[in-house]
Image (cartoon, rainbow, N blue to C red):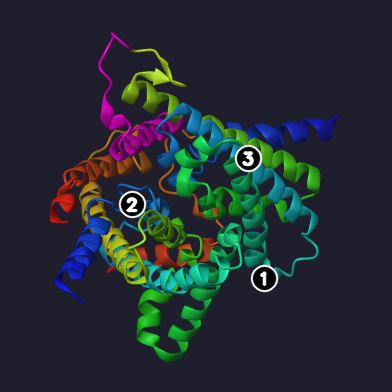
Amino acid sequence: MDEKKSLWQEFTKGIIKENPVLRLILGCCATLAVTTAASNAIGMGAATTFVLVCSNAAISLLRNIIPNKVRIPAFITIIAGFVTVVQLFIKAFSPALDTALGVFLPLIVVNCIILGRAEMFASKNKVLPSIIDGLGMGVGFTAAMLAMGIIRELLGAGTVFGLPILSGFMEPIIIFLLPPGGFFVFGMLIALAGKLSKEGHAPESTACAHCPLAQSCSKISEKQGKGAAE
Amino acid sequence: MDAQSVKTLVAIFLAAILTENYVLNKFLGICPFLGVSKKLDTAFGMSCAVTVVMVIATAVTWPLYTYLLVPNGLEYLQTIVFILVIAALVQLLETVLRKYMPPLYSALGIYLPLITTNCAVLGVTMLVLEKGAADPSFGFVQSLVNAFGSGVGFLVAMLLFAGVRERLEDCDIPETFRGLPITLVAASLVAVSFLGFNGLVDRLM
């Protein structure tokens, strides 16, 4: 009973409390780039979730075999393998989605959500919780991207999933489909998520603590701190 | 090299900086853009390191793909090969700089490990190949110029944005928007200004 409950918590934390996009601010490049349409957001979310679940499972299985010193390159290789699988699969079954996602499909490799979960969770936990963690994070990522995709598509093109909703009611505001609209909507959603969260405010910056390269990051913020003191 | 090809190279360079800016137009390398742009000098150091790695990575991956992967029918290995090459390259560059150029290492070295998982670097190596596939005249030299221009474009965006953020520090911002939200709204406005360059380079060609 207890075990079930904790697995459920493992799953839901990625969706609400630690939503990777809106609370941890990870994977911003993909979030901003592919959310010009709601259907792209779903496709990208599903591809990322698949990679996240598979790489979490594989890394969790291998966690006692991979030497600590070469763990990051090993993780990257495992992730790149699963990304190639997804890439070939989408190319074969949905060429339209492949064109829409473009270079961001192979770039799932460097999506910090995946490497971050590998380092923070999968390399320290058993297989089942790791899979659930990957699933929860993937669903949270997809949900946040979907919300952004719906807002941008509705305001920018007047449609949702290609269905005309605002036709005759108002003119589409094209700038929401362009890069500035992406930054703007993302900022608004982070502010909203921050307001609704327990802390009551949005995070100060990207979540370095969840990134495997946090060590070198903190060196930079030290340097920034020193620069400010001078 | 005749005048026409020099003109094309200049157009590629300018397009990479202004109309196809990696950060503000293509959403590549957003993490360092938001994370390291608080102070002008760190923004400058990070962008220089990115530019150097972009050019070297393109110089290595382009021949590797064209002369090794394509003739052997191994194009599908592109993602794995490229990320490993970039990771190894960054490590090598760090070691070489530390050994032979300590002043440069102390300026750029701390940024290098971050660059392995920077999507702008992996992005540039893949995008130049995509361009080459669409237009056969877009060869090795054009790819290198594009990579260098993309790096400079990254630098321009980072420096402009660092300036904007230093101004933001003194502003009285509503509590809900403090931190990242206002930073993203500011980025949106900087991106609007870059929209103004659309069409500029097509006229140059």
Residue at horizontal 86%, vertical 29%?
A1
Seen from this angle, which residue lies furthest bottom? B100
Above or below: residue B191 compared with residue B60 = above
Mark 1 highlights which residue? A70
Mark 3 highlights which residue? A49
Above or below: residue A202 compared with residue B144 = above
Type of the residue with mark 1: Val
Quadrant holding the N terminus of chain B: bottom left
Q: In the rendered image, is residue A141 in sight?
A: no
- Element under label 2? loop
Q: Earlier in the sequence, mark 3 or mark 1?
A: 3
Where residue A89 sits: x, y (%)?
A: 64, 43
> Label 3, label 1: how many angstroms apart (C-alpha)?
25 Å
What segment carries the magenta color?
Answer: A167-195
Q: Which mark is residue B114?
A: none
Residue nearest the viewer, comparing A218 with B163: B163
Mark 2 highlights which residue? B23
- Chain under numbered label 2: B
> Label 1, label 2: how many angstroms apart (C-alpha)?
31 Å
Q: Is residue A77 magenta?
A: no
Residue nearest the viewer, comparing B80 with B167: B80
Q: Is residue A194 magenta?
A: yes
Nearest to viewer (mark 3 / mark 1): 3
Seen from this angle, which residue lies furthest top? A168
Type of the residue with mark 3: Thr
Residues tagged 1 and 2 counted as in contact (Cβ below 8 A): no
